Structures are given as C-alpha cells and as structure tokens.
Image (tube, rainbow, N blue to C red):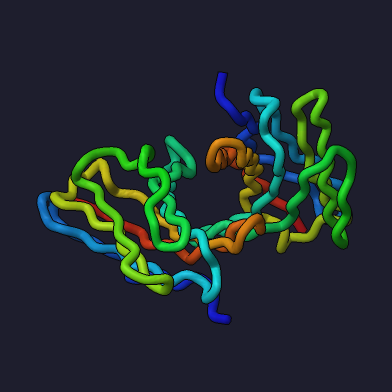
C-alpha cells in the first residue's frame, strides 16, 4: 500500500461548482497536512497547512483532516477557471527526522 | 523576497555529460530540499539539508547524483554522467523551521 493515495483525475467541473479533492494515508504517525497547487510548468505552491483534525478555512478553500480515518480533503467553493491546476496533498511526520510524502496529485479543470 | 531561485530553467544535454543545477533558497530559511518530478513517479525527495548540512540523501538514486550546500544561500545538484532516464523536472524548495515549503520554478532537464 502506498503511503499516500490520491485520485489522479482528471476532474472536470463547471465554473461555480464546489470541488472536493481527497487523499488517504496509511501511517498514523503523520502529523502535518498540506495542500499544494501546481500550475503547468510551475513549482508547487502551498495553499493550506494544518496539524490537527477538523476544518481550516481560507477564503474559498477549506482543508479538512480526519486523523481517525486517515483521510484529508480540500474543498474549493465557487470554483473559477483560474483554479484549474494539479492539487497535491502532502503529509509529514517529524519524529526521528523528517518524513515528507507527496500524493501523486489530482488534475482539476474548471470549465467556464 | 524573490522566492526560491533556480537556474537554468531548461537544460538539454547529451548522455554522458555533466549537468549542474543551481538553487538559491529564501534568505533565512534553514532547510533546503531537492525534489525530482516525473509523470510516472510524481514528486520524489532526493536530498535535504538543514543549516547547510546534508541530513538525508537516501532518495538520491545513484552515485551519479551529488548535492552540495557550501553556504546558506546556494546549493547545487550535480549529475555525472547524465543518462536519458534522468530527464525530469528538478525542484528546489526551502523552509523555515516548521513552515510549509516554498518551491522554485524548477529546472526541466532533458538528456538525449
């Protein structure tokens, strides 16, 4: 089983839709949870960063962490064509050094 | 701050040649990471430094790969000799303490 699993998509939605992106992970030692957005031919850009179960909101983006289920989600409200990108979850533990794992990414297209 | 700066943006080289990729992290950041991204394998951590000291190089694929960080503002990733399977996008990222990563724009390497 891979440490982090993510549906690669592609996921296509109409403008204005609510988008739900998800990752599952296998190691309960992971402590920190991040979402990155990567536009084509660019480096990943940090969107959300959290270390606790529950929800964290930033504008149109909400990150949700359920440690008991080892499941994290990113919700995008009122999606825009400019949200079209690949979204990567990233999970980290800092016990005994750093173990930082990226999911493979979900490619999202928001159609005008 | 200009962010993480990588050079060159693109590199095309012949098999067997030496390739050197360069990175300038964000000033004050104490961690520096080198990642490789391919369609097949996603983002892979190659090596990371803390305060200019290599901490974990277990992701470096072979002895053909080497990385140095002679000071807090500069790092290099060298491949010698290069092979076609090394073709990928190489990202450098930096972070301060427990913050999220900031990635550079990457170097797209093509080995023919």
In the figure, residue B60 lies in which quadrant? top left
Q: Residue at x 82, y 46 (%)?
A: A63
Q: Nearer the viewer, residue A11 or A68?
A: A68
Q: Residue at x 67, y 34 (%)?
A: A30
Residue A55 placed where, x, y %? 89, 45
Position above or below: B17 against A30? below
Q: Residue at x 43, y 51 (%)?
A: B48
Residue A87 placed where, x, y %? 65, 48
Q: Nearer the viewer, residue A47 or A111?
A: A47
Image side of residue B38 versus residue A63, left or right: left
Q: Nearer the viewer, residue B112 or A6?
A: A6
Residue B10 placed where, x, y %? 32, 66
Does residue A17 appear anywhere in the picture?
no
Q: Residue furthest top?
A: A1
Quarter of the image with the N terminus of chain B is bottom right
- Marker count (numbered): 0
Position above or below: A25 against A99? above
Q: Residue at x 49, y 65 (%)?
A: B104
Residue A3 placed where, x, y %? 58, 27
In the figure, residue A80 lies in which quadrant? bottom right
Image side of residue B26 versus residue A24, left or right: left
Position above or below: A61 against A73? below
Q: Residue furthest bottom?
A: B1
In the figure, residue A100 lies in which quadrant? top right
Does residue B33 appear anywhere in the picture?
yes
């Amino acid at each position: 089983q891979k440490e982090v699993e993510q549906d690669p998509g592609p996921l296509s939605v109409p403008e204005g839709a609510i988008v739900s992106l998800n990752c599952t992970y296998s190691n309960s030692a992971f402590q920190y949870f991040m979402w990155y957005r990567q536009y084509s031919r660019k480096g990943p850009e940090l969107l959300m960063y959290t270390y606790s179960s529950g929800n964290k909101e930033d504008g149109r983006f909400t990150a949700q962490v359920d440690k008991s289920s080892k499941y994290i989600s990113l919700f995008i409200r009122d999606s825009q064509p400019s949200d079209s990108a690949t979204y990567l979850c990233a999970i980290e533990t800092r016990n005994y050094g750093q173990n930082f794992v990226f999911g493979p990414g979900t490619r999202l297209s928001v159609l005008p | 701050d200009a962010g993480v700066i990588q050079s060159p943006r693109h590199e095309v080289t012949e098999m067997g040649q030496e390739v050197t990729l360069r990175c300038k992290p964000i000033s004050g950041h104490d961690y520096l990471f080198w990642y490789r991204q391919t369609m097949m394998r996603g983002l892979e951590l190659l090596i990371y430094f803390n305060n200019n000291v290599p901490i974990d190089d277990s992701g470096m694929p072979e002895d053909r790969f080497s990385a140095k960080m002679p000071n807090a503002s500069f790092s290099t990733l060298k491949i010698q000799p290069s092979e076609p399977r090394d073709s990928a996008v190489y990202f450098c990222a930096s972070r301060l303490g427990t913050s999220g990563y900031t990635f550079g724009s990457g170097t797209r390497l093509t080995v023919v």
